[in-house]
Image (cartoon, rainbow, N blue to C red):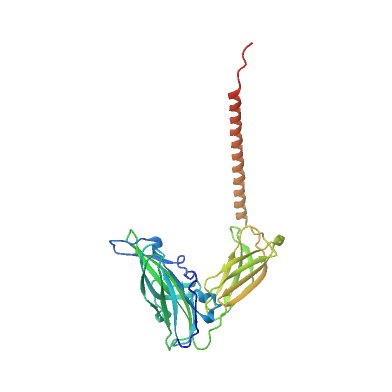
Amino acid sequence: MNGRPGVLTDPGRPETDLPEVGGEHDRSHRPHRPSASPSPDGPSTSVGIRLLDAPVNRRDDTRAHKYIVDHLHPGTTIRRRVVVKNPSKIPRDVALYAAAADVTGDGFVFAPDRTENELSSWIKVTPDKVRLDPDQETEALVTIEVPEKAEAGERYAVVWAEVSGVDEANIRNIGRAGIRVYLSVGPGGEPVSGFEMGPLTGGRSPEGDPYVTVEVRNTGRRALDLAGELWLTDGPGGLSAGPVKAEARTLPLGGTAVVPVQLDRRLPDGPWAAKLDLASGWTKRTATNLVSFGPVPAAAATENDDRTDRVLTGGLVTSGLVLALFAAYAYRRRARFRQPVPAA
């Protein structure tokens, strides 16, 4: 282990570390030769995987509890345990492997199929295939071995768990879930992580929904996964709101992004005292500002008025119909019980 720090084990952690590829799972469809007994499609092609270990020196790094995040010297080897689960109702063969990924202006991007890059070639998953009964789970070991002559820099990959099935049309369905790997390589200590936040601004969407945005720039030497919470205080009439969750796509080195926080349409225009806390691992920043959302756009206001008019008109028509029916019913009852007066 080359003097690596200890490992923090947390077997009770929920399965929240599935990177998003078409939801929490990556599903694709590939032509397949006819099968005598096709496998069920749908939920049966899902699979779960979660990280079981994290370095003790990253106990306060929330990313290290979801992903494999580390800084290694050339020639270093680390090992991390993962848990793989078959949530389907039939037995499944699960393939385990590493594949390429990258961080671009679009965020954390997964390469298709088993595309390899430099980092994925350093990763070995043992075993590389397991058969699991319904709802069964098992452990696997991820070994990352950095070559002695590896160049400095940050690299990205994904450790995938993959299952496949064939539907009634003989189409092969692939389902996979994975754990991201952010690996920095180089001599000395870990490169600095950092980011800057611009001023908070408020506004409304064309539909009239209020929002708060902030521009963020990655000033460090590692990719960032930003998430946090927004608070609104000192609003009209002393109103307050929050916390409201905020999240941004993975930010590359030197990259910028606008982080939007969508709010409830019922919030008044303002002004509000806004406070936004963002963090990536243990790197944290806060921005504050006085914001207003502005008036509701005319189109959205007209749409809301139209809805109100339709509700009022519908209510009046319904009320008139009920009154008419009630009057007719009363008249018929009077006519029924009215007796003729005999002649003198």
Query: Could you tell me which residue is drawn at 62 percent across and 68 percent down?
Result: 230
Query: Could you tell me which residue is drawn at 38 percent across and 73 percent down?
Result: 96
Residue 248: percent from left, percent from top: 55, 70
Q: In the image shown, does 25 or 267 lie closer to the viewer?
A: 25
Which of the image's four quarters has the C terminus? top right
What is the tally of numbered marks visible in this picture?
0
Left or right: where 28 falls relative to 315: left
Residue 142: percent from left, percent from top: 42, 78
Query: Could you tell me which residue is drawn at 64 percent across and 67 percent down?
Result: 231
Residue 158: percent from left, percent from top: 44, 75
Q: Give residue 325's quadrant in the image.
A: top right
Residue 172 seen in render: no
Image height of 319 relative to 113, above or below: above
Image height of 1 relative to 20, above or below: below
Left or right: where 232 falls relative to 112: right
Residue 223 seen in render: yes
Extreme-top residue of the structure: 344
Query: Could you tell me which residue is drawn at 52 percent across and 75 percent down?
Result: 63
Image height of 68 relative to 317, above or below: below
Extreme-right residue of the structure: 237
Q: In the image shown, does 144 or 184 lie closer to the viewer?
A: 144
Which of the image's four quarters has the N terminus? bottom left
Q: Give residue 127's quadrant in the image.
A: bottom left
Q: In the image shown, does 254 or 236 lie closer to the viewer?
A: 236
